[in-house]
Image (cartoon, rainbow, N blue to C red):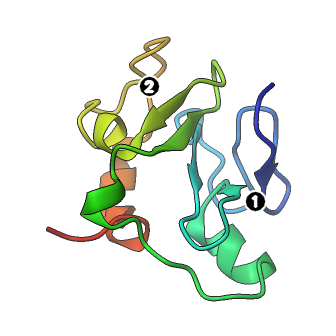
């Protein structure tokens, strides 16, 4: 069963009120609460607690969801995927790389 993605105005492909392009289809499981959110801004506006980033030691955890196929991937696989789902090949927004520090420990 596909995990629920939380946020504001989330569609079936995990786009939200903040990010709505055809490529905004990757949701991140937040380290702090274990719930998938469409984006960090959705989490910060609705969760009621501070966000935590995924430490490098936990990058083998499945924590990224493809909004196209519903496949989950590890943080490590997501960071190495060159903005394409390793399962279905759907394109992710390459601009998301500029926000990785909001979700993942900077190394």
Which sits in the foreground, 106 or 20?
A: 106
Most extreme residue toward the top is: 88
Discs 1, 2 touching: Cβ within 8 Å? no
Left of 64 or right of it: where is 60? left
Characterize the local packing of mark 2: few (<14), some (14-19) or many (20 or more) Cα atoms within 10 angstroms. some
User: What residue is drawn where x is 67% and y is 69%?
Assistant: 33
Q: Give the answer, above or below, for where 69 lies relative to 48.
A: above
Q: Secondary structure at mark 2?
A: loop
User: What residue is drawn where x is 75% and y is 59%?
Assistant: 17
Left of 8 or right of it: where is 77? left
User: In terms of image quadrants, where is residue 4?
Assistant: top right
Q: Give the answer, above or below, for where 43 lies relative to 83.
A: below
Q: Quadrant of the C terminus?
A: bottom left
Q: Which mark is residue 91?
A: 2
Q: Position of residue 70 (x, y in %)?
A: 66, 25
- Which badge, 1 or 2, comes first in the chain's sequence? 1
Q: Quadrant of the N terminus?
A: top right
Q: Give the answer, above or below, for where 70 lies relative to 35.
A: above
Which sits in the foreground, 5 or 32?
A: 32
Q: Which mark is residue 83?
A: none
| Tag 1 residue | 17
User: What residue is drawn where x is 69% and y is 45%?
Assistant: 15
Most extreme residue toward the left is: 107
Which sits in the foreground, 83 or 53?
A: 53
Q: Position of residue 69 (x, y in %)?
A: 63, 18
Left of 13 or right of it: where is 50? left
Q: Position of residue 59 (x, y in %)?
A: 33, 51
Q: Give the CA separation, mark 1 to mark 2.
A: 20 Å
């Amino acid at each position: 069963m596909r995990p629920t993605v939380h946020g504001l105005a989330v569609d079936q492909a995990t786009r939200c009120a903040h990010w709505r392009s055809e490529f905004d289809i990757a949701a991140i499981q937040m380290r702090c609460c274990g719930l998938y959110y469409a984006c960090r801004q959705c989490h910060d506006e609705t969760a009621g607690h501070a966000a935590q980033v995924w430490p490098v030691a936990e990058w083998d955890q499945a924590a990224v969801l493809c909004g196209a196929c519903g496949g989950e991937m590890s943080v490590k696989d997501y960071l190495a995927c060159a903005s394409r789902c390793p399962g279905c090949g759907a394109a992710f927004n390459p601009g998301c790389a500029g926000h990785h520090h909001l979700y993942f420990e900077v190394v």
